[in-house]
């Protein structure tokens, strides 16, 4: 029933109510869909198949799916090109520079103050 090229409507999830095309059949319960929806694995229980099919190959690109849907009269927009697929190098993250902090008092300076405070407490 769910063969490659079958036009469906998503009935559950974030893309509910949008038209999609089966791009690949994974097993009896899962297919890969693309079109007005995001290209992703989908449970067949979340799809309502329509009577229409289009002729596309297995794992067809998004551009091929969109052109086939437009020929059927279904409007959909091309997906944006992700930043990962672009070949421009990403600037490296710089580590923050630590400011040099000079210690204000040595341990030797702190010890007499502590001993003096203990003596005052013991005298009272």
Image (cartoon, helix red, strand yellow):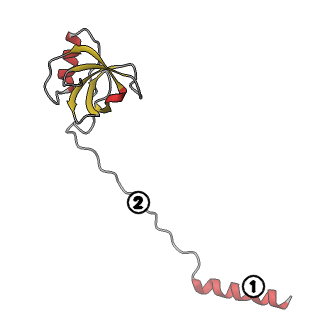
Residue in front for this viewpoint, 52 or 75:
52
Give the image location of residue 15, x and y in percent.
38, 25
At numbered mark 1, what does the secondary structure look like: helix, strand or loop? helix
User: Residue tagged by mark 2?
Assistant: 97
Residue at point 29%, 33% (across, down): 40
Q: Residues within 10 Å of mark 1 (few under 14, many from 20)?
A: few
Residue at point 19%, 10% (across, down): 71
| Quadrant in which residue 63 is drawn | top left
Closer to the chain start, of discs 2 and 1, is: 2
Give the image location of residue 33, x and y in percent.
27, 28
Left or right: where 10 falls relative to 85 = right
| Quadrant in which residue 25 is drawn | top left
Residue at point 36%, 27% (across, down): 46
- Quadrant including the C terminus: bottom right
Relative vertical location of residue 25 with respect to residue 68 in this rendering, above or below: below
Left or right: where 111 falls relative to 10 = right
Q: Are marks 2 and 1 in contact (CB under 8 Å)?
A: no
- Quadrant including the N terminus: top left
Left or right: where 121 falls relative to 77 = right
User: Residue tagged by mark 1?
Assistant: 117
Residue at point 50%, 69% (across, down): 101
Q: Which mark is residue 53?
A: none
Give the image location of residue 60, x and y in percent.
16, 27
| Quadrant in which residue 94 is drawn | bottom left
Query: Exactly how many numbered labels are in the figure?
Result: 2
Relative vertical location of residue 40 with respect to residue 123 in this rendering, above or below: above
Structural distance between the alpha carbons of marks 2 and 1: 39 Å
Residue in front for this viewpoint, 82 or 32:
32
At numbered mark 2, what does the secondary structure look like: helix, strand or loop? loop
Residue in front for this viewpoint, 94 or 76:
76
Relative vertical location of residue 31 with respect to residue 122 in this rendering, above or below: above
């Amino acid at each position: 029933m769910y063969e490659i090229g079958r036009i469906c409507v998503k009935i559950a999830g974030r893309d509910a109510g949008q038209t999609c095309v089966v791009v690949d059949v994974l097993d009896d319960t899962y297919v890969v869909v693309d079109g007005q929806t995001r290209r992703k694995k989908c449970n067949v229980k979340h799809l309502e198949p329509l009577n229409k099919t289009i002729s596309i190959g297995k794992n067809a690109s998004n551009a091929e799916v969109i052109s086939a849907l437009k020929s059927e009269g279904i409007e959909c927009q091309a997906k944006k090109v992700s930043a990962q697929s672009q070949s421009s190098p990403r600037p490296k993250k710089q580590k923050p520079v630590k400011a040099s902090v000079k210690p204000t008092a040595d341990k030797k300076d702190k010890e007499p103050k502590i001993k003096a405070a203990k003596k005052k407490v013991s005298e009272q």
